[in-house]
Image: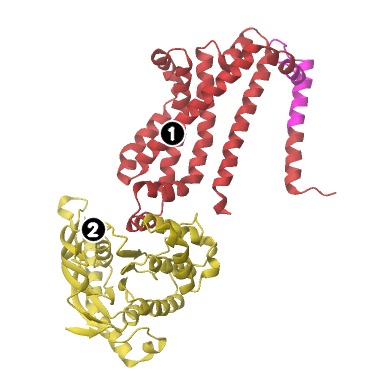
Chain colours: A yellow, B red
Amino acid sequence: MNKMTPAGQIVSSQTAAISIQNVRQQYPGRHSSAAVLALDDISLDIPRGEFVCLLGPSGCGKSTLLNIVGGLIKPTAGKVQVSGRTIDGPSPRDIAFIFQESTLLPWYTIRENFHVSFKFSRIARSEWQSRTEEALAAVGMSRFIDHYPEQLSVGMRQRVNLARGIALGTDIILMDEPFAALDEQTRMVLGEDLSELLAKTGKTIVFVTHSLAEAVFLSDRVYVMAARPGRLKTIVEIDEPHPRSPDFMLTTRFGDLRNQLYGLLRDEVREGLQIERKSSAAAGRT
Amino acid sequence: MRMTTGARIFWTRCAMLLAALLCWEVYARLWADTRFVSPPSLVLHAAIFELFREPGVIDALVTSLWILFVAYALAILFGVAIGLAVGWSSFGRKAFFPVVLLLYGIPQVILLPLFVLIFGIGPACKIAFGLSHGFFPIAVNVISGMKNINILYLRSGHSLGASSFDIARYIYLPNMLQSLFTGLRLGMTLTLLGVVLAELYVSTQGIGYWTKLYAETHDPAPLFALIAILALMAVILNELVRAIERRGLRWRG
């Protein structure tokens, strides 16, 4: 099965960029009987060059799954393959990770932050300067190159943080709710920027969110997850070319897709709330 | 001409010190027993004409400074190394930090006879005792400086493939700088205390030995002069560490 990607090249869904195979993750609880099953037997293939979202209620293990793909957590069972290689620890050559809030180190300027990141991922020193300048130019932040992160607003910091992730030049970028700390307007604008930036590069993006609008606006496909234990519920494809304009959000199709996702999640969220209510009632009795 | 606030603070301090010295001078000349207290003018006189003409005292100062620096360097080395090792993981902190705090809480003077038994009465004993004092504030401040790290910085570092050295050098160290310098300043003062204590207790050289000698022979002028020199030394060393600290913390603007 072939399909046109938004970037225009033809990829086969068999050449998955990321292949997640029977991944299970169990966390030890306070007592041996209270072990928590965070992920129960997840298998999915993420096609090369696609922008995919992991969407689900809190506690569905979407961030855990992202950390496993990034090699930051070893799964209890199963494995993750990237370009045919099994992930065993961080692989900065293939995968860049962007977190909930900016991880720019406050004691270095923007330039120094980029350089330290390049040093960590063993990128040749001769490329540091040009990579830094190009990435900052791409997000329109060039004139802040010698500022300290704290001199920038939260939104600007996260924008620079995105630029740094892209500057690492990996084929895959993992994003763990990168806009969660931002206000609604800023996250819309950054979302548009991201769609535009990444449409050109053909990178594979895995994006964790619990915002329905964000999922529909940004992704080529949405993996909807269910909680307790975390598992894959269904996949929703969003067939709309990148870069996406804000007008897409005004279409009925956008609203329909958003409602479809809400329908899939509503029962999950309700169930989650009931479980919490029940367990707190139980705790109250003892 | 109006003075700046900084200048006003400086001159107020000077005036206060001068006033205190003046009170002391008047009290010592009119009422005090000269076997125990000397007026500041005589202390100054003793410093210039007695202390610095006594070759033993100059040697003592050199010896004490040398011992102090060795002890302090070792305190930094061990304090930072052990602090890093304990503070690296939350498991390490939970398992070992209380032990470090417990040892820090023991008044070490009580162990001085033991130090003498183990290290003898030479410089080794003073270095070891100074080190045992300077080590704890440095280690404790390194550990608490590592505790408040933003966990995302570490995760980001790991995801970028940073080595343990990279994490220590570029993430932990700058993050704990403020706390580290607090430890270094406290450590400097306490190392000095440890060295002088050891010299007072059992010694035939060093500043501690000479202060004991002057006190026992009821010669307060050079005694006070020596104490003043010691105090001056402590202030200068403290300011030295602070100057380095200001350089290191420039990014805080």
Q: Which mark is residue A43?
A: none
Please identify the quarter of the rendering in which residue A214 is found. Answer: bottom left
Q: Is there a contact, CB below 8 Å, between mark 2 and mark 1?
A: no
Asked if labels 2 and 1 share a chain, the reply is: no
Confirm whether the magenta stretch covers residue A217: no
Q: Is residue B114 left or right of residue B241?
A: left
Disc 2 designates what residue? Answer: A283
The quadrant of the rendering that contains the C terminus of chain B is bottom right
Indicate the position of residue A58 as horizontal and vertical percent values.
Answer: 28, 68
In what element is the residue under mark 2? helix
Q: Main secondary structure of the magenta part?
A: helix
Of residue B26 and residue A19, the one placed in the foreground of this image is A19
Task: Kindly identify which chain the residue marked by label 2 belongs to.
Answer: A
- Badge 2 crowding class, 10 Å Cα cut-off, few under 14, some 14 to 19, many 20 or more, is few
Q: Amino acid at mark 1?
A: Leu
**Residue placed furthest toward the bottom:** A252
Identity of the residue drawn at 39% across and 38% down? B83
Residue type marked 2: Ala
Chain of the residue on which disc 1 is drawn? B
Place of residue A146 in the rendered image (x, y in percent of width and height, measured from the top left)? 54, 62
Pick out the residue farthest to the top.
B217
Instruction: Name the mark on residue B77.
Output: 1
Above or below: residue B98 compared with residue B220: below
For marks 2 and 1, give the CA distance.
50 Å
Q: Position of residue B200 (x, y in %)?
A: 54, 15
Quick one: B61 or A167, which is closer to the camera?
Answer: A167
Q: Is residue B27 magenta?
A: yes
Callout 1: 10 Å neighbours few (<14), some, many (20+)?
A: some
Label 1 secondary element: helix
Magenta residues (range): B17-46
Name the quadrant containing residue B62: top right
